Amino acid sequence: MKFPRMVEIIPPGKKNNWRVEHFGLSEEEAHMLAVRDIANPERLTKEWTPPGMYARLMCDHTVWMTDTNTERTTHQYWMGQAHGHVMVGGLGLGMCVCGLLEKPEVTEVTVVELHQEVIDLVKPHLNKVAQRYKKPLYILYGDVNIYQPNAVFDCIWLDIWPTICADNLDQMDMLIERYDKYLRCGSAGPYCSWVKCWSQDELYPDEQDPDIVDLCNKCGANVYEDDDYYIDNGLVVCAECKECLDD
């Protein structure tokens, strides 16, 4: 599952107290972040983010989402399992939506977002992505805690929290139970229906896929034990990106 670089899709903008920013990460800053993650045992995700330009969604002084590797990692597995009609709770920067639209197994995407400001900042640019892949994209203003869909879905992904925190678990369990009845029974093909919440794999580590070795440091794709992959300066690189580096 690959996610695009959001600085290439969503421009900086501001709507009331919400804003999209582009920010740079230098080699020194990337190294300091990596050292901090390794040294802090309370950090649940420890992913190397290379130097470069990134996007983030802010509300006042709170970071709600970025497209750094840490963020990509926590979406990677379940977005890779997505298929059919996918519902997403929480729009954020639209990184997951872009990845879903590009995925051949996904036929349409419905997003429910609580904040109109976020919709105004992000939706116009995601509509262009949907047009490129010729897939229906519905971005609705609403609260996933009380939203009542008029459709059923093959997969439901709920991402409404700014941080990974055990305090979110009760709400996650409630939402999973609530949306289970909106899953399509007996999804077609080799896939099954599911409803999952962002970061629940980090909070419930036993549910993680044990066959995933890491993410490719270049493209962000899952790298499995049986895949051909390489180690470049201590970082995992998938076979496809290795070929590009060699050319």
Image (spheres, grey):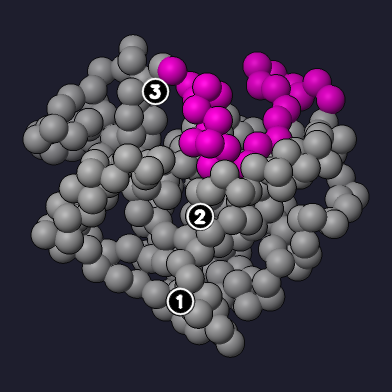
Task: In this rendered view, identify the residue nearer to me: 188 or 32.
Answer: 32
Label 1 vs label 3, nearer the camera: 1
**67 over 190 or under it: above or below:** below
| Left or right of 42 on screen, residue 153 | right
Q: Amino acid at mark 1?
A: His
Q: Amino acid at mark 3?
A: Ile
Q: Which residue is mark 1?
A: 61
Q: Which residue is mark 3?
A: 212
- Image coordinates of residue 75 in percent, x first then y, are 50, 42
Q: Amino acid at mark 2?
A: Thr
- Considering only order in the chain, which callout, 1 or 2, is on the residue closer to the N terminus? 1
The magenta region covers 185-210
Specify few, some or many for label 3: CA neighbours under 10 Å numbering under 14, 14-19, or 20 or more: some
Instruction: Name which residue lies at 22% across and 32% down.
Output: 237
- Image coordinates of residue 3 in percent, x first then y, are 43, 47
Secondary element under disc 1, as helix, strand or loop, is: loop
Marks 1 and 3 in Cβ contact (< 8 Å):
no
Q: Which residue is mark 2?
A: 163
Marks 2 and 1 in Cβ contact (< 8 Å):
no
| Left or right of 100 on screen, residue 139 | right
Instruction: Name which residue lies at 50% across and 27% down.
Output: 205
Is residue 163 covered in magenta?
Answer: no
